[in-house]
Image (cartoon, rainbow, N blue to C red):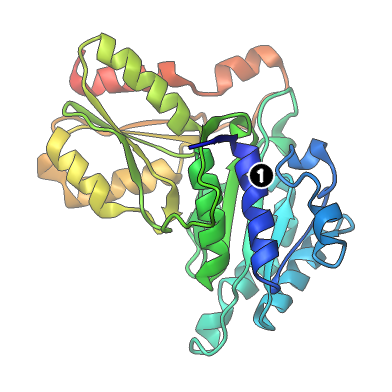
Amino acid sequence: MRTLTYAQAIREAHALLLENDPRVFLIGQGLRSPWYAGGSLEGLDSEFGPERVMDSPVSENATTGAAVGAAIAGMRPIVFHPRMDFMLLALDPIINQAANWSYMFAGQVSVPLVIRAVVNRGGEQGAQHAQAMQALFMHLPGLKVVMPSTPHDAKGLLIAAVADGNPVLYIDDRWLYDEVGPVAEEMYTVPIGTAAVRKEGADVTIVATSYMAVEAMKAVAVLAERGIDAEMIDLRSIKPWDHELIFDSVRKTGRLVISDAAWKTAGVAAEIAASVSTELFDALKAPIQRVTLPDAPAPVSAALERAYYITAGDIVTAAERAVGV
């Protein structure tokens, strides 16, 4: 099977969706700019025209609100937010409208909207350009949230999100854009709400989101050299998340490490840890370990960034702690 980068897989998913469904259109800031889209939307405006690929003014709230209205009217919009930080200006249409509309009208109207939010990190960008706020949206009823880590899943989850019929927040991380992997040429979907076992193991379960799934696979290799057989689960979807797959793994290993590259307090890792400790307390052989960012805004200094961001080494340390090394 041919290989694509993560960014190329996203671009191909957009192109297939636009080609095969006249209801699909793309709207957002910087659609023509590699600085914003990183090649993930390259050439789509030329291929499909400005009526299908709309490079919007800098107004996150208005752009998202217009897309919500279009979705209610029967279209299948994809809203592009090149920085998740600035998507905060669109919380009203996302939370009060998109997430609630179907419930307020007893399911008679759906909001088939995809909100694509890009996480930017590093590069001395500072706290207002480097925030991963997936836990905020995981908290909301009526909104689905996916975080693909591989090119295959980046394509399949975007197609699944557009087909879903509900508002879906699709979070991609710029640190993944150069990752390479096999991607089928045809349209396909990856089911929302399902995790993937990337490597089976018996000693400790490692659950990771987004780019930390890449780091977790590096950690698994290091742990194997040290005699620890780790099972690695790529969460892929955080709302809903795959309770049964994770529970079954923890029943087998008795130990759990969760890695999410966002803040620790009230985060994705906290929710999974709470659920596992509630449902599987007797199966646990050691305290659950969380590998997350510290509860502090991202620094600007490159030296401080190296200390702030988590890596495979942090997962290795947590896994060794869990198995008592």
On screen, residue 119 versus residue 187, left or right, reads right
| Viewer-closest of 126 and 256 | 256
Q: Quadrant of the C terminus?
A: top left
| Viewer-closest of 203 and 157 | 157
Where disc 1 sits, the SS reads strand
Relative to 168, say whether 3 is above or below: above
| Viewer-closest of 167 and 310 | 167
Q: Position of residue 130 (x, y in %)?
A: 67, 35
Relative to 203, say whether 156 is above or below: below
Q: Residues within 10 Å of mark 1 (few under 14, many from 20)?
A: many
Q: Where is residue 142 in the image (x, y as percent from the top left)?
A: 50, 70
On screen, residue 7 versus residue 191, left or right, reads right
Outermost residue, top side: 226
Residue 159 visible within the image:
yes
Query: Number of numbered discs present?
Result: 1
Relative to 48, say whether 7 is above or below: above
Q: Which residue is drawn at 21% across and 29% down?
A: 201
Q: Where is residue 182 in the image (x, y as percent from the top left)?
A: 49, 36
Q: Quadrant of residue 131?
A: top right
Q: Where is residue 177 in the image (x, y as percent from the top left)?
A: 63, 34
Relative to 201, say whether 69 is above or below: below
Q: Which residue is drawn at 69% across and 15% down?
A: 302
Label 1 belongs to which residue?
Answer: 118
On screen, residue 202 versus residue 140, left or right, reads left
Residue 91 visible within the image:
no
Q: Residue at x 58, y 33 (%)?
A: 176
Tag 1: amino acid = Val
Q: Residue at x 40, y 27 (%)?
A: 216
Q: In which quarter of the image is residue 7?
A: top right
Q: In which quarter of the image is residue 118?
A: top right
On screen, residue 298 versus residue 221, left or right, reads right
